[in-house]
Amino acid sequence: MFDALPIPKRGPLVPVIRLQGMIAASASPGRLNDATLAPLIEAAFRRGKPAAVALVINSPGGSPVQSALVAARIRRLADEREIPVHAFVEDVAASGGYWLATAGDDITVDANSIVGSIGVISAGFGLHEFIGRYGIERRVYTSGASKSQLDPFRPENPDDVARLRALQDQVHANFIAQVKDRRGAKLADEDLFTGEFWVGKRAVELGLADTVGQMVPTLKERYGDKLRLRPYGIRRPLLSRLGLGLANDALAIVEERAQYARFGL
């Protein structure tokens, strides 16, 4: 008798990994890094039988190392398990955020999404005149000529700046190689690697994205109306959820707002 009962067929499963916030090695709330995201990414690719994996990205960037590690993990699992990856950009996928987006086999943006900023930035302050005004003397002792570099409490050293820019050029070259490897012939014949960023449709025209749209309708068009979405995202630490650690949370929020402000957000 039971053999005659119809068994409803379940729709295709698409895990949705939310990548929202700054990319940094630190364990501050909301930070994206490989150590924090690894369990989520592994579970998304290995639980059940996913028809695809979706990435929802809203990040102004951050650490190039962590960006590369997270993107590489996604690609490694996608290739091993032969699962397509679809990236969807919300407000911004810039700098390291765009590096994450390149982990997708295709990239969908909103008409108002900010995309690009393929470059490397380093910022700081020079405080030597300030401490000198108050009679404070900086004392540093090293056993190597290059051990102390870019000291904000000393006048800027041209040799230090040259070394920093040489390092930035290497990281920039790695970023460019990632974009060219993942986007290939889709890229327009223009210089897209100056650090400039673009909005929605223009990003598509330049080949940095594939289409303008939103996640749910795009996935339903691909996988049908019976599509099952399973969300994966970083949970806030217990202390943050209880309202503790407010000072650290506030500093993290200020830092993140400064990053988003670079793109007018």
Image (tube, helix red, strand yellow):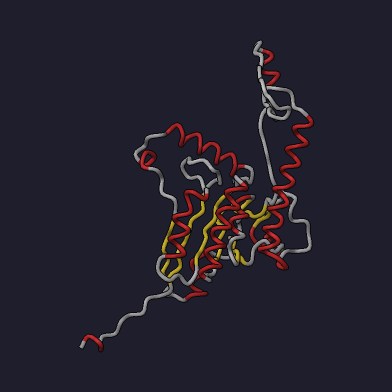
- The N terminus lies in quadrant: bottom left
Where is residue 131 drawn, in percent x and y?
66, 16
Where is residue 145 drawn, in percent x and y?
73, 27
Query: Which residue is at 58% across, 58% downward?
Result: 72
Which of 66/92 is in front? Answer: 66
Which of 223/232 is in front? Answer: 232
Query: Which residue is at 43% across, 74% downward?
Result: 12
Where is residue 170 drawn, in percent x and y?
73, 47
- 100 vs 138: above or below: below
Which of 69/106 is in front? Answer: 69
Query: Which residue is at 64% across, 43% downward?
Result: 262
Where is residue 26 drawn, in percent x and y?
51, 40
Res. 7 image quadrant: bottom left
Query: Which residue is at 66% across, 20% downward?
Result: 140
- 116 vs 240: above or below: below
In the visual, does 88 lie left or right of 123? left
